[in-house]
Image (cartoon, helix red, strand yellow):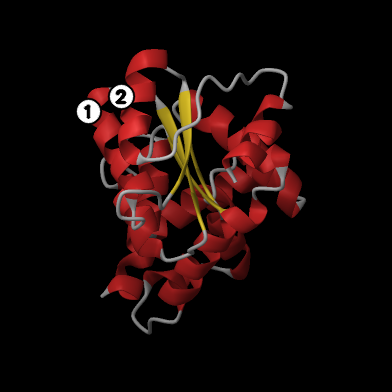
Amino acid sequence: MREGLREILESHERIEVVATCADLDAIFEAVERERPDALVTDIRMPPTCTDEGIQAAVELRERAPAVGVVVLSAHDDPAYVLDLLAGGSAGRAYLLKQNVHDRLQLTAAVDAVVSGGSMIDPRVVEVLVGARRRAEDSPLAELTPREMEVLAELASGKSNAAIAESLVLTKRAVEKHIHSIFMKLDLAYAEDVSKRVKAALLFLADRQLH
């Protein structure tokens, strides 16, 4: 898996792989030694093979806050995403391993975290949205079908321009939908887009987790 990822990443002209690591301790040693722009990590690795990738992302907030982290996982459980974003969504991405063969998605995630942005795999967003929508008292029931589509695209980390292209809308129409969505979800006064994405994910996952 590591060698496959190395090949995918090194095929990108702007990415240089400076180290590969087999366990959590090796990650911290490599980050200290190489000072990379980003870390791409499996969610599970030695010593316990549980959630070391999340642990690395959380601890690097303190040890090396400038390092972006892309976590690769076989699980679309929103609890992992919430743990990853607990300290903020800036510089963090969560992708499903089944999509790692898509070089564009993987390298886009690296670009996103290096620039301080975030990216969440669309499949995870679908799970969050679907679970929350089933709740009878969910404010998401107030959203129109088109607003639901825009919300899923937004929460997956896409820009307004990318959402417009994906849903065949004008950029102005996307902006109107986003304004309406965050008004209905009481998120209109969040400080920035990154925080609003995190707030939306936390909100959507609430019923799923409780």
- Report the residue at 53% width, 56% height from top: 151
- Report the residue at 29% width, 31% height from top: 60
Q: Position of residue 32 (x, y in %)?
A: 32, 18
Labelled disc at residue 65: 2
Q: Name the residue at the bottom extreme.
A: 136
Tag 1 residue: 62
Left or right relative to 89: residue 95? right
Q: Position of residue 41 (x, y in %)?
A: 46, 41
Tags 1 and 2 in contact by the CB under 8 Å rule?
yes
Mark 1 to mark 2: distance in Å? 6 Å
Q: Label 2: how many residues lie within 10 Å, few (<14), some (14-19) or many (20+)?
A: some
Q: Label 1: how many residues lie within 10 Å, few (<14), some (14-19) or many (20+)?
A: few
- Report the residue at 54% width, 44% height from top: 157
Left or right relative to 147: residue 167? right
Q: Amino acid at mark 1?
A: Glu
Q: Nearer the viewer, residue 21 or 111?
A: 21
Q: Nearer the viewer, residue 197 or 176?
A: 197
Q: Name the residue at the left extreme.
A: 62
Q: Position of residue 160 (x, y in %)?
A: 61, 40
| In the image, residue 187 above or below residue 141 | above
- For the question of whether residue 42 can be seen, the reply is yes
Q: Quadrant of residue 98?
A: bottom right
Q: Secondary structure at mark 2?
A: loop
Q: How many marks?
A: 2
Q: Amino acid at mark 2?
A: Pro
- For the question of whether residue 186 can be seen, the reply is no
Q: Position of residue 34 (x, y in %)?
A: 42, 15
